[in-house]
Amino acid sequence: MLASSMADSPWINPNHLVVAHRLKMWYTVQSGLFSKTRYVKAVDDVSISIGKGETVAVIGESGSGKTSLGRTLLRLYKLNGGTLIFDGKDITKASESSIAWFRRRAQMIFQDPFSAINPFHNIKFILEEPLIIHGVGGSAAEREEMVIRTLNEMKMNPPEDYLFKYPHMLSGGQRQRIAIGRAVILRPDFIVADEPVSMLDASVRVEILSLLKEIQQKMNIAFLYITHDISTAKYFSDRIAILYAGKLAEIGPYRSVIKDPAHPYTQALIEAIPDPDPSNRFKDRKIVGGEPPTLINPPRGCRFHPRCPFAMDICRREEPPMVEVKNGIYAACWLHIKK
Ligand code: SF4
């Protein structure tokens, strides 16, 4: 029944750990002289699924709806439409009190580690707190053992040196390791990592991304990795999903999409990646011009049409459906639809 209703979105797998079908997350704002109520369509009809131990990178510019999508998948934001399934259970409309099990199994890593860790608590308590909240670890001694194990996993050695330190005594990279440790100490099945390296120095970004990849493989965790920087997705993404103005523009296996992107917006994002060879750095680089549209009143038809060099009449009139372009790559673009 569930699978048949999802037949309109063949790029999602109904048997995956996380299955979101035609998800909508709209919220209202008051604007204008007469304080008119308007809808911000932050996530608008997005279907996506993530398998156990898989990483899907969600890529888009600021305001594309990627953070809203991540938080909606964690039921931190209210859904306005669509279906959300976790491990085969429909949690779309489940009450907060009935999804305590989901709260334990699905965690979030934030962009700013300070927002996730209380600066007035020491590292031992910061890591122990989720265990206490969820009633994991029978005794204080057992919980301390789990805290030490987690510090080891986060490569903060020797762990005893960190237990009674406070966040301000750590570097930005070490604070993010603690925030990651706080998410993984419960051994979740699913983590939404929202721009986890964007506030860190370039020198520690690769270390943190490598750590995330290591824990994903070791603990078989499904990740939604949110980033505006498509070049960082290479570290641990199996598939990538490109979000534009609250809608899915393209989704597919990471290597295939990077090698041969189908959507003009994805092509522009890839072409904007700086070439590591300094002599090629400014050669033939095309950066998508213009600004992303407002989510209150997005353009009719294809939302990318005001910025697209290939826009046709139909693009201004009708929204393109997602179609399979090649080898598991799906894109929403009239260039790939036989009319
Ligand atoms: Fe460009 Fe049209 Fe494709 Fe949109 S549908 S990306 S405007 S060609």
Image: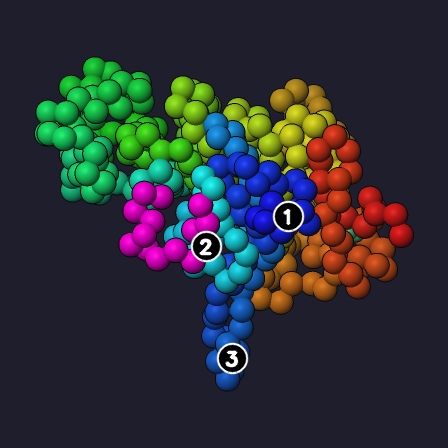
Q: Which contiguous range is marked in magenta?
A: 89-102
Which residue does the image show at 34% across and 49% down from the upper left?
A: 99
In this rendering, position of residue 339 left or right of residue 196: right
Q: Mark 3 = which residue?
A: 36
Q: Which colour scheme appears in the figure?
A: rainbow
Which residue does the image show at 75% across and 40% down from the upper left?
A: 324
Front in this rendered view, residue 190 or 4:
4
The quarter holding residue 287 reads top right
Q: Which circle's residue, 3 or 1, is located before the other in the chain?
A: 1
In this rendering, position of residue 256 left or right of residue 155: right
Q: Check contact, mark 3 vs mark 1: CB within 8 A.
A: no
Distance from disc 2 to disc 1, alpha carbons, whole Å, reads 18 Å
Q: Which mark is residue 66?
A: none
Q: Mark 2 = which residue?
A: 92
Which residue does the image show at 53% across and 73% down from the upper left?
A: 38
Front in this rendered view, residue 217 or 21:
21
Which residue does the image show at 10% across and 25% down from the upper left?
A: 141
Q: Secondary structure at mark 2?
A: loop
Q: Secondary structure at mark 3?
A: strand
Q: Mark 1 = which residue?
A: 4
Badge nearest the viewer, 3 or 1: 1
Ligand 1 contact, mark 3 (Cβ < 8 Å): no
Amino acid marked by disc 3: Lys
